[in-house]
Image (tube, helix red, strand yellow):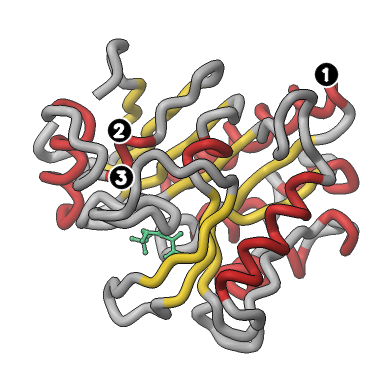
């Protein structure tokens, strides 16, 4: 993949992985708050981060986070109303955000009831309000991502354009009967982040993970390979089953 050796951390199971990810979330956020007064985080959808989100909403993790200074965004969103349990904001709200003292003004969700193209445009404006100098979007302190069995990440799917020039994009993609209409951040935004953590669990992802990390560079077919921050780090937190082919 990149020229440097990937930073891969393997855990016995998803519980231990999620505990370590919770600790890293705390450490990353504390550092960002100390240096910049706030921590800008993008959450991911999918099943894998659910355990992490639950932990962050509980002792002893919850109390170690300065929730007033956390700003939550989404790496991608499924364009269904927020009442729908397939909505990424809804999932994060139900297990995490609804249980911690994060101010409502710090929750920056995609307007998922809009048409995807409109929602993408709207979200680009949201990002602009937090823009780092010289960019039209923020440098996120922490980006949480998952990866599908097909190598997609966020809603960057195989076969989609690699060199996108906008920070957000409307996407239509079929995967596991999940909602097809989506909005995603693009590599422009992800790759300016300070820290990116991929969370992966399960044997069904093992071969793709090996291809992404150690196979040839094929970003068209393996969108996870498009994630290569220019001045930040990527940490792969994977369970033993997902690591089986490494
Ligand atoms: C989404 C995502 C998506 C997800 C992967 C992995 O909203 O669908 O953000 O990119 O992270 O599909 O999903 P699992 O964790 O359920 O395998």
The residue that label 3 is drawn on is 223
Q: Secondary structure at mark 2?
A: strand
Q: Secondary structure at mark 1?
A: helix
Residue appearing at x 58%, y 42% in the figure = 22
The residue that label 2 is drawn on is 10
Instruction: Judge by depth and name the residue closer to the eye, 72 or 161.
Output: 161
Earlier-in-chain disc, 3 versus 2: 2
Instruction: Provide residue 226's location: percent of width, then percent of height.
Output: 35, 36
- Estimate how packed mark 2 is, as few (under 14), some (14 to 19) or many (20 or more) residues with alpha carbons within 10 Å: some
The residue that label 1 is drawn on is 35
Pick the quarter of the image with the C terminus: top left
Earlier-in-chain disc, 1 versus 3: 1
Instruction: Judge by depth and name the residue closer to the eye, 175 or 98.
Output: 175
Q: Secondary structure at mark 3?
A: helix
The label number, if any, that marks residue 122 in the structure image: none
**Circles 3 and 2: CB distance less than 8 Å?**
no
Left or right: residue 219 compared with residue 97: left
Residue appearing at x 76%, y 26% in the figure = 32
Mark-to-mark CA distance, 3 and 2: 22 Å
Q: Is residue 56 above or below residue 139?
A: below
Name the front one of labels 2 and 1: 1
Mark-to-mark CA distance, 1 and 3: 32 Å
- Estimate how packed mark 1 is, as few (under 14), some (14 to 19) or many (20 or more) residues with alpha carbons within 10 Å: few
**Circles 1 and 3: CB distance less than 8 Å?**
no
Instruction: Provide residue 150's location: percent of width, then percent of height.
Output: 21, 56
Q: Quadrant of residue 96?
A: bottom right
């Amino acid at each position: 993949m990149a020229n440097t050796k990937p930073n891969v951390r393997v855990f016995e199971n998803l519980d231990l992985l999620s505990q370590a990810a919770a600790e890293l979330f705390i450490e990353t956020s504390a550092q960002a708050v100390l240096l910049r007064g706030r921590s800008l985080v993008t959450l991911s959808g999918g099943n894998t981060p659910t355990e992490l989100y639950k932990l962050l909403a509980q002792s002893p993790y919850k109390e170690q986070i300065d929730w007033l200074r956390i700003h939550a965004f989404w790496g991608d969103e499924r364009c269904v109303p927020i009442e729908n349990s397939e909505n990424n904001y809804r999932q994060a709200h139900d297990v995490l955000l609804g249980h911690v003292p994060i101010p409502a003004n710090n929750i920056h969700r995609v307007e998922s009831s809009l048409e995807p193209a409109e929602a993408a445009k709207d979200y680009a404006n949201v990002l602009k309000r937090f823009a780092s100098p010289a960019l039209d979007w923020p440098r996120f302190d922490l980006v949480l991502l998952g990866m599908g069995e097909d190598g997609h990440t966020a809603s960057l799917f195989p076969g989609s354009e690699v060199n996108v020039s906008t920070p957000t994009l409307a996407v239509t993609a079929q995967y596991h009967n999940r909602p097809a209409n989506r909005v995603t951040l693009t590599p422009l935004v992800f790759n300016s982040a300070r820290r990116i953590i991929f969370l992966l669990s399960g044997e069904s992802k093992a071969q793709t993970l090996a291809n992404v990390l150690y196979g040839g560079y094929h970003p068209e077919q393996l969108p996870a390979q498009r994630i290569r921050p220019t001045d930040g780090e990527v940490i792969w937190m994977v369970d033993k089953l997902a690591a089986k082919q490494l």
